[in-house]
Image (cartoon, rainbow, N blue to C red):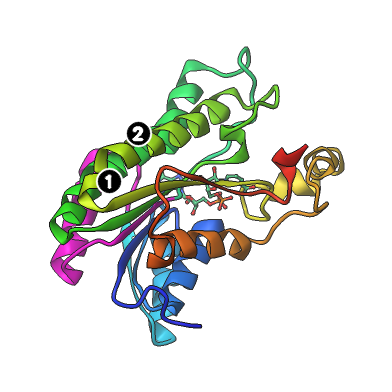
Amino acid sequence: MEGRLKGKVAIVTGAAKGMGKAEAELFAKEGAKVVVADVLEDEAKQVADNLNKNGYEAMACKLDVSKSEEWKKVVDTVVEKWGKVDVLVNNAGILSMAGVEDTSEEEWDRVMNINAKSQFLGMKYVIPAMKKAGKGSIINISSIYGIIGTGAAAAYHASKGASRLLTKTAAAEFAKYNIRVNSIHPGVIRTPMTDDLLKDENAAKGLLGTTVLGRPAEPEEVANGALFLASDESSFMTGSELVIDGGYTAL
Ligand SMILES: NC(=O)c1ccc[n+]([C@@H]2O[C@H](COP(=O)([O-])OP(=O)(O)OC[C@H]3O[C@@H](n4cnc5c(N)ncnc54)[C@H](O)[C@@H]3O)[C@@H](O)[C@H]2O)c1
């Protein structure tokens, strides 16, 4: 079945690589006009050019998700070009594995700004356009690290926990405008972010040892979940957590 997002305009952040790229590509194939937003301008342009070459509709936008002026510019550009925003995937993020004692204040701020403040800013600047359109679907990419602790990655866990609850309160705040807000909690996914970890035998053993399915997922396996939340098929879902983790949190 194709065309599950027909007529919709979707912004995907961090869409130059990894899961964001998979989401942008899948959304375009399902009929959405897609904004490939990333701090990596050239790579984002390549993703968008490739989609356009294949007959889909995409545009690249330079966006550092931690900067409000850049968000304003992107939303204005999209509304000017395509008239509205139906879907926002707050996907961009960075990993920091340090524990509490080894995390500097600068690192804490960097991770919180790019992973958590970014999702607040994205919603703040996109929601006025969604209100005008009378509907919207926002998907905040959290993590299983936003549900459980691991004894490491202090700032990362904190940022993903913030994403999870920001999602729930925004769902309650904007339900009256027909704007749905849900979070996705991926487990171990094979992307540039986890490349080094999965190559390291010990780290991989630790990560996959607690994954019931015993393997990392491909980015497309998370993109399928994002597609469902972006589409009208999930019309009765808001404030919920879609866990896509191969059973990691089942144990
Ligand atoms: N890979 C995993 O196993 C995993 C698991 C759970 C959650 N996640 C989350 O999923 C999301 C995507 O992760 P991924 O594995 O695809 O990562 P990735 O590193 O492969 O890709 C992240 C993308 O975000 C972009 N980005 C980074 N900082 C940015 C900024 N300030 N502004 C705009 N774009 C920026 C990067 O340029 C890159 O294109 C992240 O939020 C991550 O925390 C990943």
Q: Residue furthest top?
A: 101
Q: CA distance from mark 1 to mark 2?
A: 10 Å
Instruction: Judge whether residue 202 is colored magenta.
Output: no
- Which residue does the numbered mark 2 point to in the structure image? 169
Is label 1 in a helix, a strand or a loop?
helix
**Picture coordinates of residue 76, whole percent (x, y):** 16, 57
Instruction: Look at the image and tell me whether residue 16 can be seen.
Output: no
Label 1: few (<14), some or many (≥20) within 10 Å? some
Magenta extent: 63-90
Instruction: Judge whether residue 67 is colored magenta.
Output: yes
Q: Is residue 73 left or right of residue 247?
A: left
Number of labels in the image equals: 2
The reply to whether callout 1 and callout 2 are in contact (CB within 8 Å) is no
Q: 232 or 128: nearer the eye?
A: 232
**Picture coordinates of residue 2, whole percent (x, y):** 47, 82
**In the image, what residue occupies the spot 26% across and 37% down?**
173
116 vs 226: above or below: above
- Position of the C terminus by quadrant: top right
19 vs 187: above or below: below
Is label 2 in a helix, a strand or a loop?
helix
Q: 205 or 135: nearer the eye?
A: 135
Q: Quadrant of residue 132?
A: bottom left
Label 2: few (<14), some or many (≥20) within 10 Å? few
The amino acid beneath tag 2 is Thr
The amino acid beneath tag 1 is Ala
**Picture coordinates of residue 122, whole percent (x, y):** 30, 45
Q: Is residue 80 left or right of residue 150?
A: left
**In the image, what residue occupies the spot 31% across and 38% down?**
172
- Which residue does the numbered mark 1 point to in the structure image? 175
Instruction: Look at the image and tell me whether residue 165 can be seen.
Output: yes
**Picture coordinates of residue 92, whole percent (x, y):** 45, 48
